[in-house]
Amino acid sequence: MLWIFKRDRTSITDWLNKKFAAVPELAAANVAALNAGHAYGETAEIPEYFSTISMPPAALAPGEYRTATGIESLGLGLIAAAKLADLPLYFASYPITPASPLLHLLSRHKDQGVVTFQAEDEIAAVCSAIGASFSGCLAVTSSSGPGIALKTEAIGLAVAAELPLVVVNVQRGGPSTGLPTKTEQSDLLQAVYGRNGDTPLPVIAASNAQDCFECAIEAARLAIKYMTPVMLLLDGYIANAAEPWRLPDLDDIGPIDVDFRQDPNGFQPYLRDEETLARPWAVPGTPGLEHRIGGLERDADTGNISYDPANHDLMTRIRSQKILGIVKEVPPQEIGHGDESGDIVVVGWGASYGPLRMATKRARDRGVSVSHVHLRHIWPLPENLGEVLSKFKKVLVAEMNTGQLLVLLRAHLLIDAKGLNKITGRPFRIFDLLEEILAEANRDQESQA
């Protein structure tokens, strides 16, 4: 392999000598085997299709790097978010593929003030996290599609009680127990709409392993500022894939402001911040701030149980406006690769980022007018997204489902988009996406002719 990729043997030779320093003859045998393999590549008459491949050094920014999977990056991001908010991190989960490694990782970080709880089932896990949130923790729960379905009623409780909660969904193939070890992006509509009643919450999606770190902090920031559950989507491919990750400096990341209500004067549990519409976070045990929470509808001011029709209408609209107001926190959507206008734009989210970016680049190298737009914020959608997409003649939406983001874009932006869908349990390949883009470009040329 080192001969095929023209890699130097020195670093591996040094590593072998260090690893087997106590048994020099074993080190020498391994080095001899390494050199013998390299000599075989040089001397054997290997067919032409096994010719050597030049692998230049990666163009990476200077800094300290480590290899990280999506789960590792996500877990460290949650710990960082708790540090930035100066809150204890409470993580409650029930084992499920492919989300379980997050529990394994966080359970090893008690030294960072992390409390983990492996519950007896999914419902117990999310309800425990809601209780931790009520008591003033950064509360997180995680699962995959089937487990998120079981958590649904309790997530609705967190929306009604208006408590901060990060819900991590590591998607896998469905429906039901589906394909536990295969990847898919089929929980998008479940994340945006999958609760009884009008129960809105923000949804963000990580695009690769290192992006999970930033998304974890962003999810925590939104949950605390707007007093709401936040759904963070990744999938089995991102969770298990590893890549070089440049370690961030927490001093470069702004703190997460936490404003626990302390003053009992004029306190009402559902009186809202004028800017965010968030209710106050009043930790149990604070004198004068005693109040009840629950799933029954609340009076808009007092928080007492209310069956008044006008009040329910008002509360439903306020909860919706609060989530839609998060669009102020969403950066304007940018073109990830390509021109700001043209014939074709390919829209993606989540794990399609890498293949889509490379497929777009290769298509442009062949003269195709195509650009790539990648979404982190699934709900609410970026405010300028409709304007960005309107500058292209054709919109293609690539996702590993039957077209769920496609439905969202058509419904809310009134865009006549077309889906590029793959539901095989495997991630997109650059070659397949490139073929689809070239085919669309050829169809346009034929129609013009």
Image (cartoon, rainbow, N blue to C red):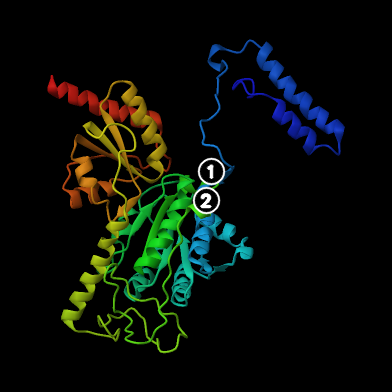
Q: Earlier in the sequence, mark 1 or mark 2?
A: 2
Q: Position of residue 79 (x, y in %)?
A: 53, 60
Judged left or right of residue 438, residue 97 is right
Residue 154 picture quarter: bottom left
Element marked by disc 1: strand
Element marked by disc 2: helix
Q: Is residue 31 above or below residue 416?
A: above
Q: Is residue 171 visible?
A: no
Q: Amino acid at mark 1?
A: Trp
Q: Is residue 50 above or below residue 34?
A: above
Tell whether label 2 touches label 1 (CB within 8 Å). Answer: yes
Q: Amino acid at mark 2?
A: Ser
Residue placed under numbered mark 2 in the picture: 73
Separation of residues labelled 1 and 2 (CA atoms): 8 Å
Q: Position of residue 80 (x, y in %)?
A: 52, 58
- Identify the disc placed on residue 98: none
Residue placed under numbered mark 1 in the picture: 245
x 77%, y 27%: residue: 31
Q: Quadrant of the C terminus?
A: top left
x 49%, y 46%: residue: 210
Q: Residues within 10 Å of mark 2 (few under 14, many from 20)?
A: many
Judged left or right of residue 7, residue 395 is left
Q: Position of residue 26 (x, y in %)?
A: 83, 33
Judged left or right of residue 355, residue 96 is right
